[in-house]
Amino acid sequence: MATASPVLDVTDATFASDVLAASNARVVVVDFWAPWCGPCRVLGPAIERVAASFGDDVLLAKLNTDENPRTAAQYRIQGIPAVKAFRNGQVVSEFTGAIPEPQVRAFFQKLVPSPAERAAREAEALAANDPAAAEARFREALRSAPSNPDAIVGLARILLARGDSTEAGELLERAPGDRRAKALKHRIFLDAFASKHAAEDLAGEARANPRDPRARYRLGVLLAAREQYEPALDELLESVRLDRTFADGAARKAALAVFDILGLDSPVTREYQRRLSSVLF
């Protein structure tokens, strides 16, 4: 176990650097307390023992609310002890009062990565330069946590990069709610479609039959497989406009798959979502 970091006393003047900035590298737990507070004296030793057991994964800071009223007011501290956990400058978890030590430990455990999560993060760092080592670490993580989404997605990416879509597809079924897994499953479909129709002139077919929803759909999927997403969406939306019921709404579903791949925050996604809605409604 890593050596525990010392408890850090923070003030109004140091809070931004010692807590907010520091929380970009690891979780910082702040105990808001005051010398006159009996429950604070009960919680203090317990939270320090628990924090010490987590080593360098968590930094424990203490702020005297009597001496630092500005920060206490900023975080609306009304009752003490008040404990807030910060990650990336934001409060991610909190509790108030002198709760029992087992509950304090449970609070900390939710803040730090599990061994499987840690292994997945280590593997992700290796993936670009040493995919074989990354694969071994991802598989190690999955042996202890078979449903860990980071390990599932990371291993699936490595498998897809070397062309093993069968194992990748089976693996991704274990993370049905993960957006990244969903996007990778779409990628498998697109790659299979492109391979199956590699010898066909789908662009020529669409030019020859511009009012055929099937031809426009097929070209749209091929363009998506080639990562030409905006032209792909143009073709798919045209297929929807021509016949929204074609193949049980295949073009609309393909457009939604492209949105999943691009991400819902993508400007392209937002623009084509608007266009798709105008076609449908």
Image (tube, rainbow, N blue to C red):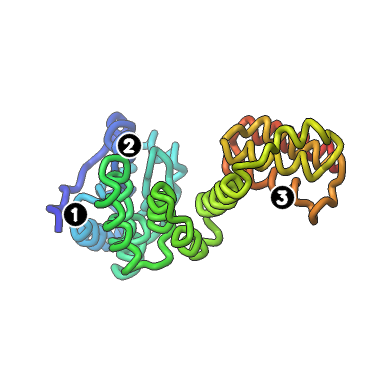
89 and 265: which is toward the camera: 265
Q: Is residue 231 in sight in this rendering?
A: yes
Q: Is residue 12 above or below residue 77?
A: above
Find the residue positioned furthest to the left: 3
Amino acid type of the residue that numbered disc 2 sits on in the rendered structure: Asn
Foreground tag (1 vs 2): 1
Residue with the mark numbered 2: 68
Disc 1 marks a residue whose amino acid type is Gly
> Mark 3 — residue?
253
**At x 32% / y 57%, what residue is drawn?**
138
Whether residue 130 sits left or right of residue 199 in the image: it is left
Are dots 3 and 1 in contact, CB under 8 Å? Answer: no
Residue at 36 percent of width and 52 percent of height: 83
Q: Residue at x 29, y 68 (%)?
A: 101
Residue 55: image tag: 1
Label 1 residue SS:
helix
Secondary-structure class at tag 2: loop
Where does the image place residue 167, in percent across and percent down from the top left?
44, 62
Residue 66 position within the rendered picture, expressed as x and y whole percent measured from the top left:
32, 41
* Nearer to the camera, 70 or 255: 255
How many numbered marks appear?
3
Crowd class of label 1 (few under 14; some 14 to 19; many from 20; radius 10 Å): some
Q: Is residue 163 left or right of residue 30?
A: right
Distance of mark 1 from mark 2, alpha carbons? 27 Å
Q: Nearer the viewer, residue 239 or 268?
A: 239
